[in-house]
Image (tube, grey):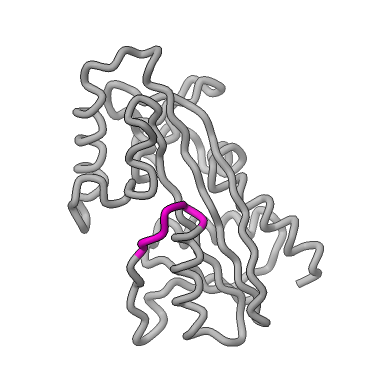
Amino acid sequence: MKIFIATSNKHKVQEFSQMFENAGLNCLVHGVDEIDGFIPPVEDGSTFAENSFIKARALKKFVSDAFVMADDSGIVVDALNGAPGIYSARYAGVDGANADLSNNEKLLKELENVPDCERSARFVCAIALITPSEDEFVFEGKIEGFINHGAVGCGGFGYDPLFYVPEFNKTTAELSAEEKNKVSHRGQAFKKMVEFLKKQKV
């Protein structure tokens, strides 16, 4: 099965490739860097699901003979009334290599005076899938936790060093790839998608 993912984030492409392999699906995974002329669309949806479909539909225009998928995910912090939410990737308004660090610094600053008992948060993910015949499906997952007072761990990306998971007594940046794929928001949404694909016998 050939599948294109609407992202230029090599971390995500690698993570999804490993997840497909672990799930027993033989997939050739491609990112948008392999497509000439693709321009990332403006993500102006109001939910993670809407934004994932905006990206998937934009990519589908370039891909006719394969599955297309896109995920939109972020961190939802209760003390910030759900922020950064759908703006997680651009929370600090910084692009490029320094985006993750800047986003993390801004989140810590916003929560500077918030006590531990009020630092609850969750990672949320919505995966949009478009089949070769252009049928559309969405799969969602989430993981509950808390925001640390500082970065811990060197794995993962994004807000992983700040997100503490009580079940493991670790941040998601400290989890092994296997642990993370089993319990993460993206892992949960992905599992639902895999179950669907297996039923389709693709």
Magenta stretch: residue 44 in it? Answer: yes
- Quadrant location, the N terminus: bottom right
Who's the residue at 26% across and 51% down the image?
A: 90
In this view of the protein, which residue sits in the foreground, 21 or 129?
129
Task: Report which quarter residue 134 is drawn in.
Answer: bottom right
Q: Quadrant of residue 148?
A: top left
Looking at the image, residue 143 lies above or below residue 53: above
For the C terminus, the quadrant is bottom right
User: Which stretch did the figure color magenta?
Assistant: 43-49
Viewer-proximal residue among 170 and 185: 185
Between residue 119 and residue 29, name the one nearer to us. Answer: 119
Task: Judge whether 148 appears above or below 32 on screen.
Answer: above
Q: Position of residue 178 (x, y in %)?
A: 58, 41
Q: Residue 170 colored magenta?
A: no
**Residue 77 image offset from top left, x and y in percent:** 38, 31
**Residue at 41% across, 74% down:** 32
Q: Percent position (x, y) of residue 48?
A: 47, 52
User: x, y percentage for residue 129?
Assistant: 60, 66
Question: Of helix, strand and loop, which mostly describes the magenta segment?
Answer: loop
Number of marks in the rendered image: 0
Report which quarter residue 34 is drawn in.
Answer: bottom left
Asked if 77 appears above or below 2 in the picture, the reply is above
Residue drawn at x 44%, y 76% is: 58
Residue at position x 47%, y 38% from top?
123
Judge by depth and name the residue closer to the eye, 163 or 179: 163
